[in-house]
Amino acid sequence: MASVHVRVPATTANLGPGFDALGLALDLWNEAEFTHRADGRIIVQVRGEGAGSLPMDQHNAIAAAALTVFSQAGQAPPGMQIDCLNRIPLGSGLGSSAAAVLTGMLGANALLGNPFNNDQILAWAIQTEGHPDNVAPALLGGLVVSVTEGERVLARKLTPRADRPPMFITLILPEMDFPTHQARAALPSQVSHKAAVFNIGRAVLTCEALLTGDLDLLGVAMEDQLHQPYRLPLIPGAQAALAGARQAGASAAALSGAGPSLVAFSAKKDPAIGRSMAGAFQAAGVSTRLFHLKPSEAGAQVNEGLGNGD
Ligand code: HSE
C-alpha cells in the first residue's frame, strides 16, 4: 500500500462581517502521514498541538473522517497508522477541526486511489463540520466565499490581484475554553434588518480589501454586527484587545472564526500589535499565545509516496 502525506492549512473564518461565509487560508500547516499496518489496527500518533490529549484510535477526528470515506466507497478500512504533526492549536478559531476532517478524508481518498473528487470531499467535510467557512478555504487555499443552497454548498476561491502587497496577520490566542458550540449558542436566533445591512456591504468590501491588499479599506470594512457583539463579552479582555490592536497600528482586527482567538491585519510584521493585544488580555487575567502568520494561496496538498513494502 502506498503511503500518503497530507498537509492542510489553518484558516480564519468570518473575517469580521462575513459570518459563516468568508474564510482565509493561513500559512500554518498540519501534516499527517498515512501508512499501512499489517495488524489491521487503526493507530494515530500525534506530535505538536494536542499531543497527549487527542484520541489515538478510530475515535480521533482524522481517523473518523477517513473511515467515513472508506464507508462511502463501500470498502472495509485497512489497518492504518496516521502520524500527525499538528501546528494548528485546538479549539482556537483557527480551523483545527476542519483541518482534521479534511486530512482524514483526503488521506483515505488517496489510499483508495482517488475515487472521489474535491467537490465530493468538500461536501462531506462541510456536512461533518456543520459550516463551510473553515473547510472550504482549507481545501482550496486563499480567500473563499461559501454559500449554502439547501443541501448544496457553493464555495468559490477569489483571485487576489497579482500586485497585492504583502499582508501580515498577528493572531492572539487567549488560553481559555470557548468551544464553537458555546460561541454559536451565544447568538440570537434573529437579527435586525439594520445589522444585516451593516454587514452586507462590509463583507463585500472586506473581500475587495483582502484581494487588493488595501488595508485602509479593510479597516473600514472589517466590522460586524451579527456575531462579534454577542461573543466578545464572553471572552475576557477581547474587546480591549481589538481596540489595542488598532491603537498599536493594526489596520483591522476581528474575532477569528468563533474565537477565542483574534486576528489583526497590518502591512508589516509588527510586534507592538501582539504586545498591545496581549496586554489587554493580561489585564483581564487571561494568558495568551501569539502567532505571526501570512495568508496562504495554497490549500490542502496530498502527496502519494512509495509504500512501506506491502
Ligand atoms: N463561522 C462559524 C462561527 C465557525 O462563527 O460560528 C467559524 O469557525
Image: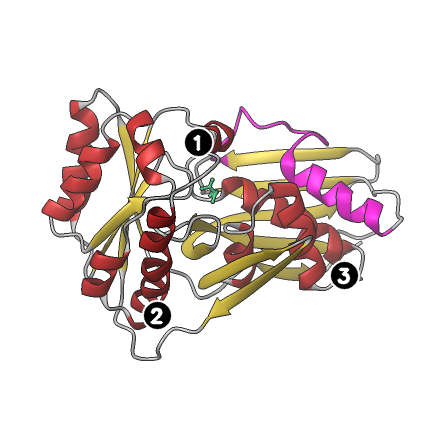
Q: Which mark is residue 183?
A: 1
Q: Nearer the viewer, mark 1 or mark 3?
A: 1
Residue contact between numbered discs 1 and 3, judged by CB atoms under 8 Å: no
Residue type marked 2: Leu
Q: Residue at x 54, y 53 (%)?
A: 8
Image quarter for residue 97? Answer: top right
Q: Residues within 10 Å of mark 3 (few under 14, many from 20)?
A: some
Q: How many marks?
A: 3
Q: Residue at x 36, y 24 (%)?
A: 176
**Vertical order, 98 against 137 (above or below):** above
Label 3, on which residue?
116
Q: How is the image coloured?
A: secondary structure
Q: Nearer the viewer, mark 2 or mark 3?
A: 2
Whether label 2 lies within 8 Å of ligand 1 gets the answer no
Separation of marks 2 and 3 at Cα, in angstroms: 31 Å
Secondary element type, mark 2: helix
Whether label 1 lies within 8 Å of ligand 1 gets the answer yes
Point out the tag, 2 or 3, that comes first from the N-terminus: 3
Give the magenta range: 48-73
**Vertical order, 230 against 24 (above or below):** above
Q: Is residue 275 visible?
A: no
What residue occupies the far front of the structure in this picture?
193
Residue type marked 3: Phe
Q: Position of residue 167 (x, y in %)?
A: 27, 62
Label 2, on which residue?
211
Q: Residues within 10 Å of mark 1 (few under 14, many from 20)?
A: many
